[in-house]
């Protein structure tokens, strides 16, 4: 292909021709010196000049480049065979074995190897490795000092750091999931990532897996039966089912018409035969139950409307902030609301009042956590505003144990799964508190400063030693506590049971006394009103009669005037 192009232009189109010539210099301006200015000049005496006698020093910080590591696995099924031998071909294996057995050193090698192997076999048969030599002995009380340390730190891989809204441990105990979502109103930019991650405790360099959707994931929970399955609550109110074996996208998700109207704050798996059902709640005031095999529509739902004798209405529903579920009580659940109420639920109820049997005012603001004690299921830990409180189902008027008001807000908490008297709290000043109510009731037993940013959520692993806590800039901390804080001693449950019974009995007595005082106050108020009516003087009675007479005359005059106006009729022309 020819890329040249020739065109012609006339000389007159170039304009007038320029002629250049030499020319000498021209003086534009000349300013002569003036001696009168010299007489006005003043020398400065003395002259100050600064001098630095010390060595000039500077501070520089240099950091090495971060090295990214990756783990790769290999499936090794059959080893020790040459590459030309197909392990799936039995005839090829048989030919190779016969070839090796005919070698000269085969007998010597086998004789050399069978001696140690036979000794190990005989020793194994002589010693029972599963025999219990000391039966019925109790472990000694650990004298280890109560300590904690940060085992690992996991940062948000995205460029724009996002707060962590939820944490969840896998049943494999080595993996945990975190969800990143900015819940502040109109603070979520279009350039922010929608990914949430699954991390391995021992590898903080790269996430083990990541999940994403069309909108950010607010809550993510592992299935206790199958660690590959997760249930997620989305920012737009949908719920989704994720599978670790099928990539980052959700396997199934609910349709928008049957989903929640607001972000899903909490999802929990429920105990069923299939192991594929969970329920969710949102600030729209509803609780919905789902089946992962069919997420088009919820299997059941309830509106958190506490009005008695009326049909449930979404306009009166309380906005929910968290859920609680215990697998040992499969039909019961609890909901924490944004205005500080705890609502008890029963799935087997026939009407609205039986489905929501009772509710109580627990906190001044939103409730961030409701968690039952695994050893004493009647005792419930709630976290909200500036306090953490322990309620008993036998005494619903007031908490039996509570913490003092902190200077900062509390953002989460949970009971220890292994030691019944221990629970954890996260605070807005970045401190993780450990409370042991058998050791100390007025202050935390152990406090640990994790971050300068507010902590947003936390979860405890099943062994009670590892705790994952997250902050508002997308960093997750895995904290390891000493074993004496996770192990329960011989008499802990006995002492704790006695404490709960004692505090519950005390609150019941106070509650009965308060009811009696309120009843007496109502009776006294009623008697005072009756006495006031009976003790009217003759003058007051005369005044009342005079007022009644005036009112009767006034209304009679108005009625008579109205009749006169009606009798005249319209004017005729």
Image (cartoon, rainbow, N blue to C red):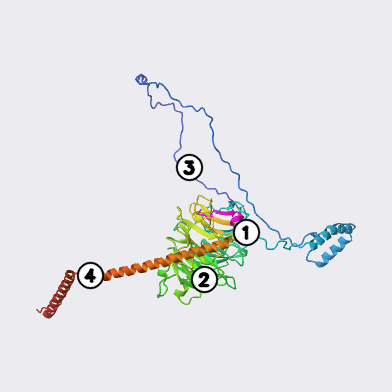
> In terms of sequence position, does the residue under pointer 3 or pointer 2 come before the other?
3
Q: Are marks 3 and 4 in contact (CB under 8 Å)?
A: no
Q: Is residue 180 magenta?
A: no
Cα separation, mark 1 vs mark 3, equals 85 Å
Q: Which residue does the numbered mark 1 point to in the structure image? A: 174
Q: Which residue does the numbered mark 3 point to in the structure image? A: 11
Q: Which span is picked out in magenta?
A: 470-487
Q: Nearer the viewer, mark 2 or mark 1?
A: 2
Q: Which residue does the numbered mark 4 point to in the structure image? A: 535
Cα separation, mark 2 vs mark 1, equals 30 Å
> In terms of sequence position, does the residue under pointer 3 or pointer 4 come before the other?
3
Q: Secondary structure at mark 4?
A: loop
Q: Are marks 2 and 1 in contact (CB under 8 Å)?
A: no
Q: Nearer the viewer, mark 4 or mark 2?
A: 4
The vertical placement of 114 against 49, above or below, is: below
Q: Secondary structure at mark 2?
A: strand
> In terms of sequence position, does the residue under pointer 1 or pointer 4 come before the other?
1
> In terms of sequence position, does the residue under pointer 4 or pointer 2 come before the other?
2
Residue 163 seen in the figure: no
């Amino acid at each position: 292909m020819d890329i040249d192009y020739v065109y012609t232009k006339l000389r007159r189109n170039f304009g007038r021709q320029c002629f250049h010539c030499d020319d000498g210099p021209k003086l534009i301006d000349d300013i002569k010196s003036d001696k009168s200015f010299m007489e006005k000049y003043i020398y400065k005496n003395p002259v100050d000049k600064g001098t630095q006698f010390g060595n000039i020093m500077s501070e520089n910080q240099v950091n090495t480049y971060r090295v990214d590591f990756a783990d790769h696995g290999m499936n090794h099924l059959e080893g020790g065979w040459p590459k030309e031998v197909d392990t799936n071909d039995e005839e090829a294996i048989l030919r190779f074995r016969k070839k090796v057995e005919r070698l000269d050193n085969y007998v010597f090698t086998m004789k050399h190897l069978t001696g140690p192997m036979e000794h190990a076999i005989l020793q194994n048969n002589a010693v029972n490795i599963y025999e219990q030599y000391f039966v019925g002995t109790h472990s000694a009380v650990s004298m280890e000092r109560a300590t904690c340390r940060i085992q690992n730190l996991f940062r948000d891989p995205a460029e724009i750091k996002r707060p962590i809204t939820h944490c969840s441990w896998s049943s494999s105990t080595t993996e945990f999931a975190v969800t990143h979502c900015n819940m502040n109103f109109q603070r979520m930019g279009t350039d922010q990532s929608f990914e949430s991650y699954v991390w391995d405790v021992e590898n903080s360099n790269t996430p083990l897996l990541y999940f994403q959707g069309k909108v950010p994931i607010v809550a993510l929970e592992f299935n206790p039966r199958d660690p590959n399955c997760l249930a997620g609550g989305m920012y737009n109110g949908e719920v989704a089912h994720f599978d670790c074996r099928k990539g980052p996208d959700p396997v199934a998700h609910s349709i928008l018409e049957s989903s929640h109207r607001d972000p899903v704050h909490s999802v929990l798996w429920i105990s069923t035969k299939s192991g594929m059902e969970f329920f969710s709640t949102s600030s729209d005031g509803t609780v919905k139950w789902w089946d992962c095999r069919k997420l088009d529509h919820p299997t059941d739902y309830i509106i958190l409307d506490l009005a008695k004798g009326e049909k449930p209405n979404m306009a009166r529903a309380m906005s929910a902030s968290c859920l609680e579920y215990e697998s040992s009580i499969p039909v019961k659940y609890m909901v924490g609301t944004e205005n500080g109420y705890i609502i008890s639920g029963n799935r087997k109820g026939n009407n609205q009042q039986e489905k929501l049997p009772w509710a109580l005012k627990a906190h001044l603001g939103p409730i961030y956590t409701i968690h039952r004690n695994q050893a004493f299921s009647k005792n419930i830990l709630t976290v909200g505003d500036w306090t953490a409180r322990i309620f008993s189902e036998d005494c619903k008027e007031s908490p039996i144990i509570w913490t003092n008001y902190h200077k900062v807000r509390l953002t989460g908490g949970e009971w220890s799964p292994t030691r019944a008297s221990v629970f954890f709290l996260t605070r807005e000043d970045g401190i993780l508190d450990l409370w042991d109510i058998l050791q100390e009731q007025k202050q935390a037993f152990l406090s640990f400063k994790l971050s300068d940013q507010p902590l947003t959520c936390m979860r405890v692993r099943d062994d009670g030693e590892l705790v994952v806590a997250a902050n508002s800039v997308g960093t997750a901390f895995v904290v390891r506590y000493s074993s004496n804080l996770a192990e329960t001693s011989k008499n802990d449950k006995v002492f704790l049971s006695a404490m709960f019974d004692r505090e519950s009995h005390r609150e019941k007595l106070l509650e009965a006394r308060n009811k009696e005082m309120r009843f007496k106050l109502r009776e006294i108020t009623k008697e005072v009103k009756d006495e006031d009516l009976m003790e009217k003087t003759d003058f007051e009675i005369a005044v009342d009669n005079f007022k009644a007479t005036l009112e009767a005359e006034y209304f009679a005059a108005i009625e008579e005037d109205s009749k006169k106006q009606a009798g005249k009729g319209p004017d005729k022309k």
